[in-house]
Image: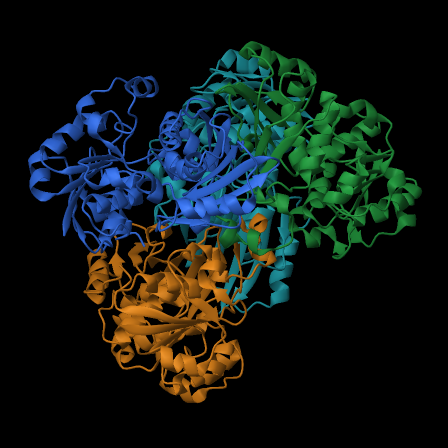
Chain colours: A orange, B green, C blue, D cyan
């Protein structure tokens, strides 16, 4: 039985991780911490009533080391890189939800985020997208759990880039996220009477997930890839719908296109290649990604959907945890 | 042309009042004030772009007196009673959206709200529910615009109480409001990922609109009426659905019941008596109330729907304004 | 391993039952049938992709008898009572989702529904609300799974009725259901542009769940109980919010009220007694019921929330199945 | 006073047109017809109660000629081209909402739709996008009201194409529409429990609005333009959010870009050029289009929002009607 701590259990990804772990047959929640709200988890989150008797406490590193084998670190970036070294030193493995260990290039990280204070661990952190980097995850001590948008986008593009079927420039990724992606803090933009019946774009040309996507795409392609990622938010709780528009290097037949995806994801438990456009609702509350590659007006168009809190965060983290510890990758997730 | 000021233009009822007045053929917006956010209204509220060139300014009472004949005062209670006397002194008539002048009984007001600081004006304020108190509104200098819940509830009950058809005790009013009723301020309870796909009850037995409803009901009945009002909030922007459950004093025939309502509201421009349960969406963004009186299991059951921001606030205020100034009551509202 | 068939797998409760059984450690889906749409379940319901390889077939009673120990019968009423006798004859136990075996009194059933064609099995069918009738369910061959509204309403009222704390007349149950309660068939009333941002009442005084509620309430009280049940539908997928308004026989203290509920549901795995009003979202996609008993204006007011498709249908059916077969009642449901 | 008939008053665009015309100071509804549902409009559409006393009747061409100066023809394509010649012959002007008179090139029309049966009137029909083709609309007898998607997309692209700032190929238009765009007929895809909390793409590479957009874009550019239009549907009633991704021919400065749009739309009453991404909700229930042109990663990115039923249908039709009759273009629409 793997003993799991959740550091930062107060946000959406923390609670989602709790929910999944309560169903996990070979992992056991042993320690919950948060930065602000302390007490019985089931009192703070009535949806846990009857299912979780643990309390949420302030983080104590000694306790962490004694109680847990692995920490799911749901802290925000910057806070994360201040705590992760201490958690590793306490002897636990870490799956980190923040952006702090995702971007290898320091200059890029510091351009989009801020000065990095833990270069040492950055050097050995592994990017935790199992379908692309499973082998590196296996022995990792520190896994950087991917961003929600990059998960859906990277899995949509990877087969094309790996097989050199599309040009590495001019790629457009237009995504619409559900509102839970914006986190738990009430803001005017996510106030129900504003967000309901609404849709808007944001972070035009500057979203922090764009360089993360480019890093993954370049890794897969084996050469630099440039892409434009444009996020939007729509009036639903969960899910990300990504529409990718790419220019083929040479004409591709429909059969080749479909086979490329099927071959690339052969044996993957959480990837489904569809024959029609996907719907966000069909993956809601699951760890699945549904992908539909097709053509339109001379472009390769790929649609993907994920649940931003599961495959885009907590589910993927637990998938990574399963891999790290040599368990069946799907435990708790099917 | 009546010159209208909106005091507290920053909230939902302020903006809604602006929208209505932009379509009003015999009234003209001349002055907008707020407590916090200043600047061109159309910059602060992009939905006004192209339609409103006024700026929102801090309130200046001299300016108010010079620029306006009437003030729609959209300030919160307590703030309202500190400003209304000054506005009246500045020579404008006031339609006040707060609770400060709605409840005649000082002890009741102070039990549910707080110490009253303007008893003088409370004494002559008129409760602005036109369908019930039109005659008093006509010459009023200060009209207390009713609460959103009391508007829908009072209009549902009035024909029964006036005609002494139901017992004056044991009445249950179960209402569900859209989220805009909670105002513009982001809070955890109205954060989209919490409120969406949700419904909950609140203020059990203690909602401040309950004594307001009892006052109106007692006025109409000519004797004390006691009722239980229970509010809930549901995942929609606008509207209040009220289900009223009452005990008949003596058996009533369906024809009598329907005729009672039709007679009571004869000639009313904004009241529709339906023959089937109403739907909130059919009155959204209108000043109408739809009412369906019927029977079930020995009780008289009455359903009413209104738009909480229009008939429940800004529309009714402008209906009151029209009456005060002797205009056609429906101007700007049909 | 219990072998489970789902008869009528094409509707919402069928798919929901599949979802739960895929996570059940001691039950195994062996046979799926429907009336109309046949083929691989995962092709018809993309949300099952990767998780369910079974096909949906026309019902073959021989096959049913050979493949299954129990049938979850998700057929509509009338169809159900034409098939259940044959399923029982084929040697399987049946948990029936329709209304056909819920109401013991034939005249009442036939008044609200239609002529009953299987009186024989009606005679021994057990009403499957485990928290109230667990002992009878244990050995049952045929369990009538309760209606969604009656589940939430009955559990809200039972402690009061059992302890003779409220009058057995004049009870008002005002409920709001999510739209999935209306089933999978597209209709004008549930068309998104109509239902979204809407709320309405229906079936005033005549809803078929009302006599079902009265039967349960009378059973619990040990004397006839009369109640008025009024359903509404609101713009959300899942859940039922019920507000119950009752007259106490004698004054009750808050402590007594709370203790009455805690004692009544002591040891129950799926019932939580709250200290504040519940929220539908907190029980969505769970088998839990959250109940908050309180007072307001001389009445006892009780709020309950359930997920209409889980505790109100598929989850409760599997809870019943677990009880029938002597399993831990919570398997697959926590 | 212009006398207006609505042909096909039964659908969403018909009712929306009624709503607008009820507020129009110089037009009067005189005749409502439909294909199926007849009777008092306010009985069929309770939201019209108290405001519209007209009945909906089967179309009688004699009556049309006697009662109306202009017909807003809200019939579906194919039906429309069978009736429009007769309406013109009856002596009324026609603003047609269908696709039948939008596409000049017969082969294109017949490829995307079906054989055209009214080439005579197609020859003189005018494409009714006032901001681009106002002069032609002025004297027109038959105006083809644009599609909802083409309205938002064309207005987003026109300033760039007219000024030769972007390449005429490789343009991507990714749009998300509210559900009312799919019409009033209940279908599985728009059933609330499916559509709510969902988002999906459809008509990949084959949507009928794509050639319409290309025609307008080519007209504006003065040369052939090719574009990829991808529609999606999201869980809201109203509005279309369009994100356009284009390749600049040469570098453009931000100031030039903004000025290009401001100059192009100078004096336009319904176009607002924003300095930040628009939000669908800010144009809901208005005839406005909000546009934000900007840059990202070497591309010109333009966002536009409209209300699909107003600027994308009924509002634009009435704007066209105003122009045809020499009225102030904004009457009824502000």
Residue D285 placement (x, y as % from top left): 59, 39
Tally the numbered discs: 0
Q: Residue at x 25, y 36 (%)?
A: C74
Q: Residue at x 42, y 42 (%)?
A: C239
Q: Residue furthest bottom?
A: A120
Q: Is residue A174 left or right of residue A192?
A: left
Quadrant (top left/top right/bottom left/bottom right) for the C terminus of chain B: top right
Residue D71 placement (x, y as % from top left): 54, 24
Residue D74 placement (x, y as % from top left): 48, 28
Residue D69 placement (x, y as % from top left): 60, 20
D122 above or below C323?
above
Quadrant (top left/top right/bottom left/bottom right) for the N terminus of chain B: top right
Residue closest to the eye, C102 or B190? C102
Q: Residue at x 59, y 42 (%)?
A: B204
Q: Is residue C264 left or right of residue A320?
A: right
Q: Residue at x 52, y 79 (%)?
A: A111
A229 above or below A224?
above
Can residue A44 be seen from the camera position used here?
Answer: yes
A166 above or below D37?
below
Can residue D166 be seen from the camera position used here?
Answer: no
């Amino acid at each position: 039985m793997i003993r799991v701590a959740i550091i930062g259990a107060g946000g959406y990804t923390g609670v989602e991780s709790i929910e999944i772990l309560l169903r996990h047959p070979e992992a056991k929640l042993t320690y919950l911490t948060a930065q602000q709200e302390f007490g019985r988890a089931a009192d703070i989150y009535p949806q846990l009533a009857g299912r979780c008797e643990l309390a949420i406490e302030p983080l104590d590193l000694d306790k962490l080391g004694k109680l847990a084998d692995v920490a799911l670190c749901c802290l925000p970036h910057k806070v994360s890189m201040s705590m992760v070294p201490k958690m590793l030193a306490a002897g636990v493995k870490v799956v980190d939800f923040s952006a702090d260990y995702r971007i290898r290039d320091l200059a890029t990280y510091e351009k989009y985020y801020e000065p990095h204070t833990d270069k040492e661990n950055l050097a050995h952190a592994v990017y935790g997208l199992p379908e692309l980097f499973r082998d590196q995850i296996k022995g990792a001590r520190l896994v950087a759990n991917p961003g929600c948008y990059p998960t859906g986008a990277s899995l949509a593009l990877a087969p094309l880039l790996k097989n050199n079927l599309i040009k590495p420039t001019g790629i457009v990724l237009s995504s619409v996220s559900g509102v839970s992606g914006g986190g738990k803090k009430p803001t005017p933009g996510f106030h129900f009477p504003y967000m309901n019946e609404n849709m808007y774009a944001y972070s035009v040309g500057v979203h922090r997930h764009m360089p993360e996507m480019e890093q993954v795409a370049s890794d897969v392609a084996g050469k630099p890839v440039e892409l434009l990622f444009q996020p939007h938010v729509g009036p639903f709780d969960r899910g990300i719908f990504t529409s990718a528009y790419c220019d083929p290097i040479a004409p591709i037949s429909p059969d080749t296109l479909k086979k490329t995806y099927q071959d690339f994801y052969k044996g993957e438990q959480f990837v489904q290649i569809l024959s029609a456009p996907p719907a966000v609702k069909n993956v809601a509350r699951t760890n699945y990604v549904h992908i539909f590659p097709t053509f339109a007006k001379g472009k390769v168009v790929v649609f993907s959907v994920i649940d931003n809190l599961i495959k885009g965060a907590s589910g993927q983290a637990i998938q990574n945890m399963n891999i790290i510890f040599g368990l069946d990758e799907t435990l708790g997730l099917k």
